[in-house]
Amino acid sequence: MCGIFGMTGVGAVAGTLKALKLLEYRGYDSAGIAARREGRIDICKTEGRVAKLEELVCSLKETDVAIGHTRWATHGAVCTANAHPFLSQNGKFAIVHNGIIENYLELKKKLGDDVHFTSQTDSETAAHLLERNYQGNVLDAVLHTARQLKGSFAIVITTVYDEKLYAIKSKSPLIAGISQKGACFCSDIRCVSHWATSVAVTPDNTVAELSSDGVRFFDFSGNPLSVPFFAPEKAEAYESVEGDFMLKEIREIPARLRIAKEGYVRSGGLHLSAEEARRLKRIYLIGCGTAYNSGLQVAAVARQWLNLDIFSVIASEFIYDNYIADGRSLFFFISQSGETADTVRAAERVTKSGGLTYAVTNTSESSLTFVCKRTTNIYAGAEYAVASTKAYNCQLQTLTLLLLDLGRMRGSVSDALYMEIFGGMNFLPEAIGDIIDNSRILINLAETIKDCSAVFYIGRTADYPTACEGSLKLKEISYLHSEAYPAGELKHGTLALMDPAVAVVAISTCDALRDKMASSITEVTSRGARVISVSPDVFTDATPVILPKIHPALAGIVSVVPLQLLAYYVAKALGRDVDKPRNLAKSVTVE
Ligand code: G6P
């Protein structure tokens, strides 16, 4: 959440603006750039999107040092005054910040009444502290400030006193990048990998100083640190799309599943020793949002063939609970970005207590991969729409492969079952391609759903997580009220909400539970609600969206696709900004 960037080099303002466009998925409430030139720092900032900043930024003269920010508000309303960068009172320092300075009220008090704050943010405190701490040496002022801050922060600083950039990093992500054209600090490795020849992941509790000689790192006491630089994996070039990223990304699912399967095989599968696999007692699948739903889904499937306890836990809940995390517990931390603060914190907790940790991610060099012992890439390719789609399908397939491998090592998955499911994956791209090619029915259904007062998604066992993901997609991009329920649970409260203004999406892929779902559908239609069934079967009184028959262990990878498309078309019918829904961000780097 919040994208920060700072660069030195020719055309720093234009370079920063370009970077902010790539970082906008991290937050898009407001944006701003500070340009440092001899003796002064000029700022241009605005409420709204980077596109609006682009119209205004011509007021800034080009220069060699600039910092920029794209905001997802935590402290203070969405307005230009609360947009970053912030200047110190004397105008000699400017900062951009990602994270939360938890002790900002205490620090504000310490700064005293002479310091005039121009915003309601926690971030501005850092700019004033730098001014207060400056006694002729910028690095000392930065180190002193770093020691005073509590919370999570990646802060990039420019100053009139020299042409360097400085950064303070604790918990929030910060990459340093170097190229022939200049050097930068940035929130996101993908954003720098197009042009940087060499990058470093800044460790926690570090101050960094970027000058024409390169980047130097220090701990908060000022002791030099050695941080390795490496050549980044080239990210796909950011292309603008005609239409929406979300639809483009759904259309990529078939191809991405093929790539992900090949990638998994190439990577050598589950890197667990026979002894570790044999001793296991339990598995945890931990994530947030869509990533959590993917864990929920795979747990429901793998429970059928792994003789182990499998728990899916929301990362922010896991941190404060008391789950067993010893050497007999295997943890899969699932995160498209690898930067979600709650997931990273949960992984840190487990690492300390000796659990076996895996990052299952789309970003192989991220905060999460640095915390976890092992990493498995999901190969979904860059995902820009805030609502995650193709990453979910790839997470499901990769986790299924990992747990199948584990089952084989432990002897609970026979070679025949393994081959059935592994081979079944070859049919997924075509099955999903057919659903995408026949979206007309979903476009029509979207028209009927868009005026509903609420949309409920129901399913049993492995279809329930699919219901959760369908419901999440709909609420985040259409803003319609939506909930997911295990179908059998409806009668314990939620049936009270059924009336003709309500729609129910019933997902049913399990033959053995077909009749149970038929009863649930009758329960809601007899209370006036309209029902859409998503199933290989047809149900009385429900409008059918027909699914192809797929191996039950893989059904969720397919059945979610019409739900992703339905959410997309409902949001379009309501005129929503599908790729950048209100109040959300793609990468949530605050707890
Ligand atoms: C945010 C995004 C969701 C995403 C979740 C977890 O809430 O808007 O789309 O599922 O974060 O993100 P991660 O990168 O950890 O998968």
Image: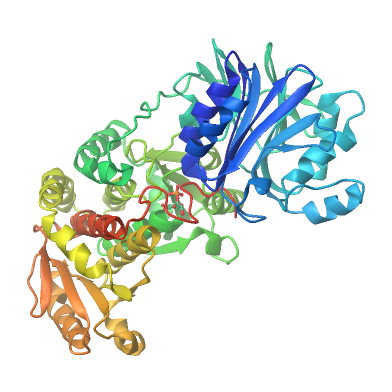
- 381 or 461: nearer the viewer: 381
Residue 33 horizontal side relative to residue 241, left or right: right
Question: Is residue 317 rendered to the left or right of residue 468?
Answer: right
Left or right: residue 399 versus residue 190 is left
List x then y, in percent, for residue 334.
42, 50
Asked whether, in this view, residue 377 is left or right of residue 201, the answer is left
- Residue 299 visible, this angle: yes
- Please indicate, yes or no, whether residue 303 appears anywhere in the rendered image: no
Q: Position of residue 338 (x, y in %)?
A: 48, 43
Q: Which residue is drawn at 33% across and 46% down?
A: 391
Residue 501: x, y in percent? 27, 80
Residue 337's spot in the image, x, y percent?
45, 43
Residue at (37, 26) in percent of width and height: 237
| Residue nearest the viewer, comparing 38 with 334 | 38
Residue 510 vertical position relative to residue 126 in the rendered view, above or below:
below
Quarter of the image with the C terminus in it: bottom right
Count of marks placed on residues = 0
Quarter of the figure with residue 37:
top right
The colour style of the image is: rainbow
216 above or below 317? above
